[in-house]
Image (cartoon, helix red, strand yellow):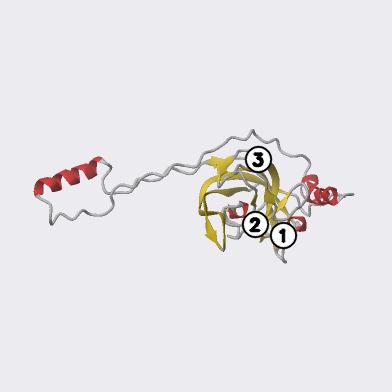
Amino acid sequence: MTRSGAAQGAIDGAIAAATSSDPEQPSPASAAPPKKWVSAVTSRVSTKWIGGAATVLILGATAGFGGLGAVPEPPLPELGPGDTFTGAGMEMTPQRAVLIDELGEAGIRVEEGQRVLAVIMDVTNIDDAARPSTGDGGITEIRIEGAPDVAPSVARYDDTTLSPWLQPGVTAPLVLAWAVPADAFAEGDDIRVALHTATEFTGEYFVYGDYWDDVEVAAHASLPIEDVGAGVTE
């Protein structure tokens, strides 16, 4: 058996083969990042040097634009399994979430009292150059609400390549894995996956090249958890 075949069998045996059947996924649907809203004036205008008539005009204009309070931002998009969010130069489509006793094939190690929470997702690099899945702006920026605020381990689902590079225009099936307390999540729980946007810039950061910053949570995807136990079938 080739390395690719053996590796895929390892993860398939750990996750996919441990379930009776994969749930039918809905068609992906793109979601655009939410727009930012401009806040209204929040500071009091000094009127020591302004005549009475000018003061009235300024305060009247402020009231016309919503007063002195800040305008609330709209809620972030809420997605489901199979929905696609575009941000940080990637199309991210979360598919499944599983609890498993261990998943060394994805580069994650657990200690006593821990299990692995894994999210299976398809990712397409829509930039014009290959880029790593790790680092600023990459897939490792993704977090799970209620899970430790640490970067996940990332591996390809098909051949277990760790921290893979994402080729432009090529969809990569990935496994994101976190070590979590054994009693933190259970079968049937819904988890919220925080997806992000980022801004690309070209400059020098140790070496000259393309980098990402201004990483922000821009959408959430809710996924039901499947508990696959040890992840091994007889």
Which residue type does callout 2 highlight? Answer: Pro
Q: Mark 2 or 3 closer to N-term?
A: 2
Label 1 SS: loop
User: What distance separates the C-alpha of mark 2 from that of mark 3?
Assistant: 23 Å
Which residue type does callout 1 highlight? Answer: Ile
User: What distance separates the C-alpha of mark 2 from that of mark 1?
Assistant: 8 Å
| Residue at (60% x, 42% y) in the render | 126
**Extreme residue toward the left, this view:** 52
- How packed mark 1 is, by other alpha carbons closer than 10 Å (few <14, some 14-19, many 20 or more), is many
Say the numbered circle drawn on residue 169.
3
Q: Nearer the viewer, residue 100 or 135?
A: 135
Which residue type does callout 3 highlight? Answer: Gly
**Extreme residue toward the top, this view:** 27
Depth check, mark 3 against mark 1: the one in front is 3
| Residue at (62% x, 58% y) in the render | 151
- How packed mark 3 is, by other alpha carbons closer than 10 Å (few <14, some 14-19, many 20 or more), is some
| Residue 23 position within the rendered picture, expressed as x and y whole percent measured from the top left | 71, 38
- How packed mark 2 is, by other alpha carbons closer than 10 Å (few <14, some 14-19, many 20 or more), is many
Label 3 SS: loop
Q: Which quadrant holds residue 35?
A: top left
**Extreme residue toward the right, this view:** 1
Tag 2 and tag 1, C-beta contact below 8 Å: yes
Looking at the image, residue 70 sits to the left or right of residue 194; the answer is left
Looking at the image, residue 5 sits to the left or right of residue 196; the answer is right
* Residue that mark 1 sits on: 108
* Residue that mark 2 sits on: 152
Label 2 SS: loop
